[in-house]
Amino acid sequence: MTVSLLLGPVLRHVGPTTATVWVETDAPCDVRVRVDGGPVSASRTFTVHGHHYAVCEIEGLEPGAVLPYEVFLGEDRVWPEPDSPLPPSVLRTLSPGAPTRLLYGSCHTPTGDTPEGLVRYGPDMLRATARRLAREGATGDNQVLLLIGDQVYADEVQEPMRAFLRERRGEVDPDGAPEDEVVRFEEYAELYRQAWSDPQVRWLLSTVPTLMVFDDHDIRDDWNTSAAWRGAMDRQPWWRTRVTSGIGAYWVYQHVGNLSPDARAKDPLWASVRDHRDRGTDAGDTVDSFAWRAHDEPSSYRWSHHHDVGDVRVLVADTRCGRSLEEDDPSGGSRSILGAEGHDWLDRHLTGGPDHLVVASTVPVLLPPSVHHLEAWNEAVCAGAWGSAARGPAERLRQALDLEHWGAFQYSFHRLAEALLDVARGARGPAPATILLLGGDVHFSYLARARAREGRTTSRIAQLVSSALCNQLPPNLRRAATLSASWPLHVAGRVMTRLAGVRRSPLSWGLAERPYFGNTIGEVVFDGREAEALWYHCPQGGDDALPEVRRRTRV
């Protein structure tokens, strides 16, 4: 029987001498990755709910290597595809002394740049980036792609996915699941297949090391916004299946590839999955049990991960699954965007030493100030700052306006801001040249420069946001977002927060220019102690259009 490659190869975690390649196949098999002039990695697939995956670890590579590779299923070579117009895929290992290029973005709706897709969602910046990099060719720089949220939209599916759901479920879903939302693992598997099968996106993921973290739409819009939101979802008969399938699929498709070989060897679920693989059994029930526990007991698993890329420390923070949502006392820490364990993890890694420190959070830490004030005011009112009668309306406003970023978790915001200032002042080791906060989620892009309200800092602090990769805001929402960044609303927000007793932020910041609403992919280039931020956009869509630099600035 001939085995086919369903998804991948996806180049995931790389180190100076190691690389990880992830694939999905349509049947159990042995997967081999053969590197040009180098080693061969072989791995047996593991099975989850009837789907087959392999994580191939290639070791013994040279630092700074850029090497073509091939993928074999059994004895059959399945990658590169023989008729592809794109260059051969390569493995890229890290070089300690080379400049580092971090590409980043969020919110990707697959449209294939069809005429209808271009009108509603705009040009696909993953496809455009593939065309740019294919033309430029591989360089010796350290290059990493950070996909920081909404890699798939489980609750806003396109027509091909809706057709799959209709065919699979029939007229009526037995659990009453929404007809246009993904609920089960099989459906998530198809959602990822449709998102990552585009030839240009597939080539990009096969040749640029990629790190990922989930945001709300990977599971459901406004995931873990508040205790009230979570309680309402828990009462839905299909929600347990949905959150279990979504978190389990996220581990399989996204998270397992974030881990270094050493970290993966210590991962408890990876050990269980390998045991199922060795016994030839399906790990679906084991993955489900793990996923439900991760939802029910957020402290049971850490989704955040960190990477040293040359002289750049990259901290990728989970701001969704690990949230603590009790409303009793936001200033005391019971309500937290990271949870207690998440904050402790971040504190341990927020140190000086590297030339640059990057904190990647799907939801921006520094929003336009007026929005930050609105979220802080709303959290305080939800917690009772204006009396019990105001709590219900404030909660409804929170859910209606998606007030669930760092500003809506003031304990977390202050704890992070104070830690960043410690690092910037050299209190936790030699201060880095820059402290950069990377974010997505909001469907517009901007730069915000920040400073301490009191005292001086050595490091430059900035928030960089690039969103969306392919999901531009409709015109009415663009107008609302533009208004939210206006000075009158900023002043009004400050007054509201003071009336609600919200603490003043230790950071002061402002947007360097008006938000940009076209689709973008961001890039930060680090060279020594210097850092330059770029935003690419694609004024013209289609299969031949190349992205252009919309803005370039030193940070």
Image (tube, rainbow, N blue to C red):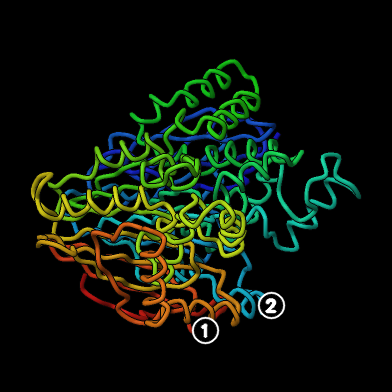
Instruction: Decide which of 548, 57 is in the foreground and name it.
Output: 548
Residue under numbered circle 2: 116
Relative to 380, 354 lies left or right: left
Among numbered discs 1 and 2, the one appearing first in the sequence: 2
Residue under numbered circle 1: 540
Q: Position of residue 317 (x, y in %)?
A: 38, 46
Residue lying farthest top?
Answer: 279
Label 2 CA crowd tier, 10 Å (few <14, some 14–19, many 20+) = few
What is the three-letter code of the residue carrying label 1?
A: Gln
Relative to 70, 331 lies left or right: left
Relative to 13, 142 lies left or right: left
Residue at image location 36% in from the left, 48% down from the top: 412
Residue at image location 49% in from the left, 70% down from the top: 125
Residue at image location 42% in from the left, 78% down from the top: 489
Q: Compared with residue 277, is residue 376 higher up or lower down, i.e. above or below?
A: below
Marking on residue 429: none
Q: Position of residue 112 (x, y in %)?
A: 62, 68
- Position of the C terminus, as image quadrant, is bottom left
Q: Position of residue 155 (x, y in %)?
A: 67, 55
